[in-house]
Amino acid sequence: MVNAAIPLRPLHLRILFPYILTLSKTDPRRINAPPDITGSKEIDLELYTYIALLVRDFINPWYRLVTNDEDLSTEIVNILTHVIQELQKRCRDVVDWSELILISAPNLLTLHYRDYRQVKERLYTGHAGGAHSIEDLFHGMQPHFALQSNAAHEAEYLRVLTDHILERVLKPSDYGSDGVRHLVREIIAHMVLASIVESLSDPYTIHLIICKLLVGFDPLVDALEATGMFSDPYEDQQKHSGPPSPVLTHLQSALKEAQMTDLAKGTKESTVPVSVPDRIAETDDLARQLQRLQEKRRLQGDESVEAELEEEGIEGTPQKRRHFSFGYITLQVVLAPFRAFWVYIMAALTHSQERYHQLTQHKQRTRRIRLVEPVMQFLRVAFLVEHRVVLEWMWQMVSMFIWPLLRMFGVGVLVDKFLEQTILHFLSEDHLVFYLQLGRDLLWSNGIFIQRAEPTTPLEEEQMRIRAERLLLVSLPASVRMTLFDTNDLKKLENHMHEVLEPLQNKYINKHLMYLLVDLVASRLIPELLEKNHTSNL
């Protein structure tokens, strides 16, 4: 049993750099190791943890059977590190994140929502085109090569896409080696991209992400459930899934009996008769659950995914993610011109004339306007504003008369600047660390890769859906809920919120959205993919 008082060595050091642990604590090779990837220690720690998990789960199981040589692991780490550095340069110098997040992504989401609801209306009508399921009808509206009838198309599409990306980010010598190129391609295509698409397409994962992002509203939801303003999630689940199983019914009745039984009458026999075979089956079931739980804890103790501090007596506290602050973003927008003016003055006085000309010739990539309109259009479609006559009339009046006047007086420019600063805030270092940790928790839940973990039960999926909908509901101010849904009844509001999230409840349909997003991000990272000679090969 692992002593909890002694922290484990960081996972990436134990798997990727075991030789470092044999060096003296004062050795410069140990102090400066491992080499930097991005220039941020926190981000590098998460990236090395990802690489260590990939090597642990997909390289070592078969490579250790052949040899104990560390050369292959070292070479894989060097190649993946180079790929990450090249992608980082493109993320910094090529991608216009304001356009990607505020324009392109909302347009894709709007298209997804509209097509799903249109398909739902056409199903089982004369306009369905002979399709017998909502999946087939949706695929007819949004055909994608990766989602053809043959499942092999999905893996082949990711391989071809990854191969074209590696052509631009790998060293020519590495890309020219068939063995290296194929190995790295399989790691990225099968273990990274395929797992991300499979995970993020699952409605359970979408609901889990919502719950993690809105964890600050958990006490409010718990209070509403405790007071009975929200119905019991178990009752909601039974409405959707039918009558419960006999075992679940017996467990619930036994739990209620235990809660109602007086401790002084502990010797009183239970009033629920249970046969001997049922007791034996329940005992075996509990024993298997206990065995699986012990195995999980043993694996977590052996190879903890969390990169902890080394046994060097160094105390540290993890950085907390900065919460969104309206005042902070507004202050950044107001001070941005003064900060730019100060930079130019200092450059003119302290730098060379050539450096001054470089600064004055610099142009901001995101000189876009009307950044708020794609987001507002998506919200209009998602919340079914066009189905509410009064709200739709108000929306049209604001968009046609009030908003153009506000833009004439400079309000639109301030809103665009505010949104750009908001994107920079959500792409800051601490937020990127949080996103990487969230992705790691999704792909390696409890230290086990998602494809090897036990599947979630329908009860767990339904409870997560209800929890996500309630968190989204309470996160909206009461005035906004009243304006959007014209009611304060929590039961009716839950039904409305279910309608908002309904287009994300089908895994196969979500895959269409995910592959469109993958194509979008890949085209922004590697603009060369849009060239004719590359497009013809995809």
Image: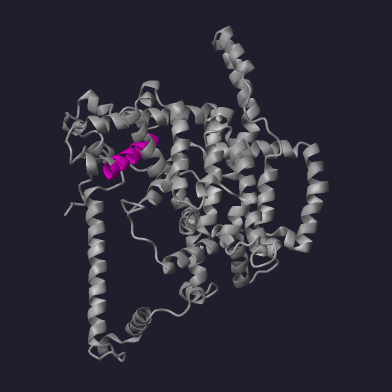
Q: Considering depth in this image, is 26 or 110 the residue closer to the camera?
A: 110
- Magenta range is 42-58
Residue 460 placement, left or right of 10: right
Residue 392 placement, left or right of 54: right
Whether residue 82 is visible, yes or no, is yes
Instruction: Say if 57 sits above or below 253 in the image.
Output: above
Residue at 42% in and 28% down: 85
Residue at 18% in and 51% down: 3
Instruction: Say if 231 sits above or below 270 in the image.
Output: above
Quadrant for residue 311, please give it: top left
Measuring from the top left, give residue 106's x and y in whole percent: 62, 46
Measuring from the top left, give residue 408's x and y in whole percent: 80, 37
Instruction: Say if 249 sits above or below 185 in the image.
Output: below
Residue at 63% in and 52% down: 141
Is residue 55 covered in magenta? yes
Residue at 70% in and 37% down: 414
Which of the image's four quarters has the N terminus?
bottom left
Is residue 315 covered in magenta? no
